[in-house]
Image (cartoon, grey):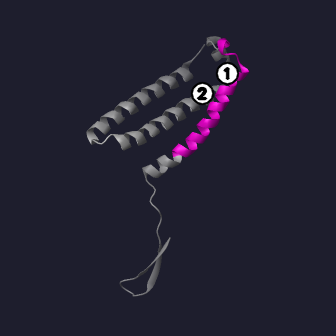
Amino acid sequence: MAIRTLSETTGRAKTSQRRSRQNFETWSWLFMRISGLVLFFLALFHFFIMHILNDVTATNVTFVAARWKNPLWRLSDWLLLALGLLHGSNGLRFIMDDYIRRPSTRVAVKSLVYGLAGVMFIYGTLTIVTFKG
């Protein structure tokens, strides 16, 4: 958007460009859209592989060990974990901002949710990375 103003010193018109502000909420909104789309396809792929191509009763430690010998399967499962936790935590942040009015309560609940998400992320990542089968 171009804005025309008069220069105080010369009295001539000058044009300046004004950019829209990009803050955390803008990036959060964009992340939700992109991660939701990626999660949709990752979840469909995971469901198809684990529940349609393979028998659910055959899913055991041996099956997971054979699957995780390929690093791409580990990456796929880790992306599902990471994006799912980040997308879910960000969605909960929106809900907490809408419904929790007292700032001190909001900080406490957000800290609890983010702490639990962090612990689950670390535990899940360690499981995926260190699994030997």
Taking 106 as reference, is 21 above or below it?
below
The type of residue carrying mark 1 is His
The image shows a total of numbered marks equal to: 2
Which is nearer the eye, 17 or 85? Answer: 85
Most distant residue in the bottom direction: 11
> What separation in Å lies between label 2 and label 1 (alpha carbons)?
15 Å
Q: Residue at x 36, y 83 (%)?
A: 8
The type of residue carrying mark 2 is Asp
Within the image, what quadrant is residue 45 found in? top right
Name the mark nearer the viewer: 2 or 1: 1
Tell me if mark 1 has few (under 14), some (14-19) or many (20+) residues whose alpha carbon lies within 10 angstroms of its own.
few
Q: Residue at x 65, y 27 (%)?
A: 46
The answer to whether residue 114 is left or right of residue 46 is: left
Residue 43 horizontal/vertical position (percent): 62, 31
Within the image, what quadrant is residue 89 found in? top left
Mark 1 lies on a secondary structure that is helix
Q: Residue at x 48, y 65 (%)?
A: 19
Residue 133 horizontal/vertical position (percent): 60, 13
44 is within the stretch colored magenta: yes
113 is within the stretch colored magenta: no
Image: magenta residue range = 31-58
On the image, numbered disc 1 is attached to which residue? 51
CB atoms of marks 2 and 1 within 8 Å: no
Taking 5 as reference, is 89 above or below it?
above
Q: Earlier in the sequence, mark 2 or mark 1?
A: 1
The disc at residue 77 is: 2
Can see residue 69? no
Please, what is the dominant secondary structure of the magenta stretch?
Answer: helix
Which is nearer the eye, 9 or 38? Answer: 38
Can see residue 24? yes
Taking 11 as reference, is 71 above or below it?
above
Residue 121 horizontal/vertical position (percent): 48, 28
